[in-house]
Image: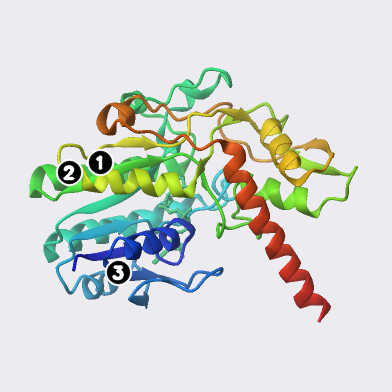
């Protein structure tokens, strides 16, 4: 039986990835600072540990894993990453985790390691025009990410690639573009736009309003979790390609349009109140030419389908929270 280690197992993508690996027949060990808030883990073994600690990394790598997925990071949505208040933590915490995992993974003789990078590595100057952002993989250099989160991701990409060159470690790197779906953070300050907007729409009374950061004309694309994992597994199984490659949707929408989609799903008519808030770049979209060329596949689920599933899940969370406070 193949063995997989998932770091960041208590997080959104890690939790879903473990379910997928279990369905595919892996034995899975998960590691995280915390358990997943929204569901029981499907992992065979779940270790609570801090991957900034070298000893924790050495201990969790005590058997020869066929596949390691390094998803652990200090991260959140725009409110967390772009406010500037968490820059030192984001850089120090995530870089330390990656320094430990690549080094001790190599020492332990792991066969393959996946690293989750981000669209946030792309240069700010290529993402000023909301209608025409450039995020093809080779456009990452000369580098100029707009956040320290993006700089750390770029540094870590390079470190994993250096371990490949110098130590022949089999590394795989994907740049995720806004992954969303059920069991993602939906409240508390670290939630991202799709979850935040679904929550606001679910909470609003018919005819009311919801707040949107900025003018809402900034563009993004959002990828449903199932297709993210499909891309990750294809990358891991490839015999010829290690990335970095974009894993994202190329259905680009404005944030105002995203809100409209959530309203359609909820069957509510609300007005948008544009307020000041942390924004990030003006436009971003996944360029899927490379993933299509390598795998003959790219994400294609319509945004509205993923929003419908996410909206329903967030509505249930709100109802459960209300029942708890009423009782
Ligand atoms: P998440 O925050 O839900 O999961 C990350 C997990 O890492 C959390 O459960 C957290 O507790 C854990 N973690 C943080 N510090 C740790 C430490 N010191 N030791 C052990 N565990 C620690 O995030 P996610 O959305 O599941 O993202 C997974 C990965 O994908 C991250 O590396 C993230 O940067 C990357 N990514 C995600 C997106 C997205 O849209 N979700 C986009 C681009 C990149």
Q: Quadrant of residue 316?
A: bottom right
Q: Are marks 1 and 2 in contact (CB under 8 Å)?
A: yes
Quadrant, the N terminus: bottom left
Q: What residue sits 26% from the left and 56% below the top?
A: 99
Q: CA distance from mark 2 to mark 3?
A: 27 Å
Considering depth in this image, is 56 or 226 the residue closer to the camera? 226
As drawn, is 62 to the left or to the right of 189? left
Query: Circle 1 — which element?
Result: helix
Residue 158 - label? 1
Furthest residue in direction bottom, as rendered = 327
Q: What residue sits 67% from the left and 51% below the top?
A: 311
Q: What residue sits 80% from the left and 54% below the top?
A: 203
Instruction: Please tell me how crowded label 1 is: few (under 14), some (14-19), or many (20+) other residues with Cα within 10 Å.
Output: few
How did the renderer colour the structure? rainbow
Q: Is residue 193 above or below residue 291?
A: below
Nearer the N terminus, badge 2 or badge 3? 3
Where ligand 1 lies, by image quadrant? bottom left
As drawn, is 105 to the left or to the right of 81? left
Residue 145 picture location, percent across and down: 44, 33
Q: CA distance from mark 3 to mark 1?
A: 27 Å
Residue 224 - label? none
Mark 3 vs mark 1: in front: 3
Check mark 1 vs ligand 1: CB closer than 8 Å? yes or no.
Answer: no
Residue 9 picture location, percent across and down: 40, 65
Residue highlighted by disc 3: 28
Q: Quadrant of residue 218?
A: top right
Residue highlighted by disc 2: 162
Nearer the N terminus, badge 3 or badge 1? 3
Residue 189 picture location, percent across and down: 64, 56
Q: Is residue 5 above or below residue 203?
A: below
Quadrant, the C terminus: bottom right
Residue 27 picture location, percent across and down: 26, 70
């Amino acid at each position: 039986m193949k063995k997989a280690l998932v770091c960041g197992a208590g997080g959104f993508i890690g939790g879903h990835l473990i379910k997928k690996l279990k369905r595919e027949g892996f034995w899975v060990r998960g590691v995280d600072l915390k358990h997943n808030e929204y569901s029981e883990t499907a992992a065979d073994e779940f270790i609570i540990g801090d991957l900034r600690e070298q000893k924790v990394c050495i201990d969790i790598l005590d058997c020869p894993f066929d596949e390691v997925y390094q998803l652990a990071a200090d991260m959140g949505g725009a409110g967390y990453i772009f406010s500037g208040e968490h820059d030192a933590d984001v850089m120090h915490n995530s870089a330390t985790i990656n320094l430990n995992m690549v080094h001790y993974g190599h020492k332990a003789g792991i066969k393959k390691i996946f690293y989750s990078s981000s669209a946030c590595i792309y240069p700010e100057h290529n993402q000023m025009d909301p209608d025409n952002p450039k995020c093809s993989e080779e456009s990452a250099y000369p580098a100029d990410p707009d956040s320290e989160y993006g700089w750390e991701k770029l540094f870590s990409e390079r470190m994993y690639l250096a371990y490949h060159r110098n130590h022949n470690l089999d590394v795989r790197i994907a740049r995720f573009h806004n992954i969303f779906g059920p069991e993602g953070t939906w409240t508390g300050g670290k939630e991202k736009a799709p979850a935040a907007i679904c929550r606001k729409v679910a909470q609003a009374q018919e005819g009311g309003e919801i707040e949107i950061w900025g003018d809402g004309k900034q563009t993004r694309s959002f990828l449903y979790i199932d297709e993210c994992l499909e891309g990750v597994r294809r990358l891991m199984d490839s015999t010829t390609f290690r990335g970095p490659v974009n894993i994202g949707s190329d259905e680009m929408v404005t944030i105002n349009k995203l809100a409209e989609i959530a309203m359609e799903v909820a069957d509510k008519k609300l007005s948008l109140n544009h307020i000041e808030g942390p924004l990030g770049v003006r436009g971003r979209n996944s360029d899927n030419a490379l993933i299509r060329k390598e795998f003959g596949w790219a994400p294609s689920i319509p945004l509205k389908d993923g929003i419908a599933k996410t909206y329903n899940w967030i509505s249930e969370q709100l109802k459960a929270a209300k029942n708890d406070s009423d009782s």
